[in-house]
Image (cartoon, rainbow, N blue to C red):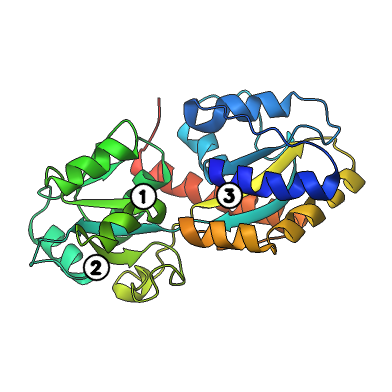
C-alpha cells in the first residue's frame, strides 16, 4: 500500500501542481487512519488509500467509529496484489491445490496455515479456502508477514496464502513452491501459476484490492479531478514498472464502480465471517 501510494503520489503531484504527502496511519486494521479521514475537511486535500479491509472491518470489528460507505466518497479502485498459496519447495508430496485439499480432508486438524494476523488478507484467503473446501486446517496468526514467512521457510507451519510481493523472491530463489493464485485470473508476475478456482476449488476468489476515498461531502468536481489524475498516473511508465515489480495488477474505475464494488464485497465478507465466527475482538 505504501509503495502504491508513494509511486502514484509522485505523478499526482506533477499533474495537479500540489505536493502529495504520504502519511502512514497503522493500527486496528486501518480503522485509525480511516476514522481520521472520515472526520477531515471534505475539500479534496485529505484522501486515503485503503485495502480490502474497508469491506471486511464492518464485520470483523464489533464497533467502528465510522461507516465505510456513508462516511466516504469513492474515488477509484487502483490495483490488486494477488495472494499466493505457498509451501516449502522441499515438499515432494504437495504440488497442487488438489493435493492440499485431499491431504487436509484425509487428516482433519493436522495441517496449518500461517497469516500476518487475524483479519488480514492473508488470513482471509486461508479462511475462504477452508470455508469453501469444508476443510479443518489450523490458522496460526503472526504479528506481521515477516515472522510468518520465516516460520514457513523453516517448516514450522505447512502453508501460507502470502502476498505475491513477499513470496516471489523466495519462489524465485527456489525456497518456496507456488501452488496457486487467489485471484480469478493468473498473475502477470507468475503466469505459469494457476488460480485456486481453476485448480480444484471453483468459486474461490480473494482479491486484495487497493482503492482511494475522500471524506463524505467532497464536491463531485474534486472527486472527478482526483480520479482522472489517478487513472492518468497509472498509465505512466514509472507506475507501470513499480506495479510490475510488486506484482500489482492495475484496475482503475469510476467512483460509482468503486461504490458498487465496496457494497458487494462488504456483503460477501459479512456472510463469510458470520458463518466462520472470525472476529478481531
In contact (CB < 8 Å): disc 3 and disc 2: no
Mark 3 or 1, closer to the camera: 1
Secondary structure state at the residue bearing disc 1 = helix
Q: Which residue is mark 3?
A: 210
Camera-side residue of 133 and 86: 86
Quadrant of image for the C terminus: top left
Image quadrant in which you'd find residue 280: top left
Q: Which residue is mark 1?
A: 166
Residue 1 visible to an observer of this rendering:
no
For mark 1, does the 10 Å Cα neighbourhood hold few (<14), some (14 to 19), or many (20 or more) residues?
some
- Look at the picture and state if 245 lies above or below 149: below
Measuring from the top left, give residue 161's x and y in whole percent. 32, 53
- Look at the picture and state if 58 lies above or below 65: below
Q: Earlier in the sequence, mark 2 or mark 1?
A: 2
Camera-side residue of 262 and 14: 14
Camera-side residue of 15 and 140: 15
Q: Earlier in the sequence, mark 3 or mark 2?
A: 2
In contact (CB < 8 Å): disc 2 and disc 1: no
Residue 270 visible to an observer of this rendering:
yes
Horizontal side, residue 237 vs residue 26: left or right: right
Amino acid at each position: 500500500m505504501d509503495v502504491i501510494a508513494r509511486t502514484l503520489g509522485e505523478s499526482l503531484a506533477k499533474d495537479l501542481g500540489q505536493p502529495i504527502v504520504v502519511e502512514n496511519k497503522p493500527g486496528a486494521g486501518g480503522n485509525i487512519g480511516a476514522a481520521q479521514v472520515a472526520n477531515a475537511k471534505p475539500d479534496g486535500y485529505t484522501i486515503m488509500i485503503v485495502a480490502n479491509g474497508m469491506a471486511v472491518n464492518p464485520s470483523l470489528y464489533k464497533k467502528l467509529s465510522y461507516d465505510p460507505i456513508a462516511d466516504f466518497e469513492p474515488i477509484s479502485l487502483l490495483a490488486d496484489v494477488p495472494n499466493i498459496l505457498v509451501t516449502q519447495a522441499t515438499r515432494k508430496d504437495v504440488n497442487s491445490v488438489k493435493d492440499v485439499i485431499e491431504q487436509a480432508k484425509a487428516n482433519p486438524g493436522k495441517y496449518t496455515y500461517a497469516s500476518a494476523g487475524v483479519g488480514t488478507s492473508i488470513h482471509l484467503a486461508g479462511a475462504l479456502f477452508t470455508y469453501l473446501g469444508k476443510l479443518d486446517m489450523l490458522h496460526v496468526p503472526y504479528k506481521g508477514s515477516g515472522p510468518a514467512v520465516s516460520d514457513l521457510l523453516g517448516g514450522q507451519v505447512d502453508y501460507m496464502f502470502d502476498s505475491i510481493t513477499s513470496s516471489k523472491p523466495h519462489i524465485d530463489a527456489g525456497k518456496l513452491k507456488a501452488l496457486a493464485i487467489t485471484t480469478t485470473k493468473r498473475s502477470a508476475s507468475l503466469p505459469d501459476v494457476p488460480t485456486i478456482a481453476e485448480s480444484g476449488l471453483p468459486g474461490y476468489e480473494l482479491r486484495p484490492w487497493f482503492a482511494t476515498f475522500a471524506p463524505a461531502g467532497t464536491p463531485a468536481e474534486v472527486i472527478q479531478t482526483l480520479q482522472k489524475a489517478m487513472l492518468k498516473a497509472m498509465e505512466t511508465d514509472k507506475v507501470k514498472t513499480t506495479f510490475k515489480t510488486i506484482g500489482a495488477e492495475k484496475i482503475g474505475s469510476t467512483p460509482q464502480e468503486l461504490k458498487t464494488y465496496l457494497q458487494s464485497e462488504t456483503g460477501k465478507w459479512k456472510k463469510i465471517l458470520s458463518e466462520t465466527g472470525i472476529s478481531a475482538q
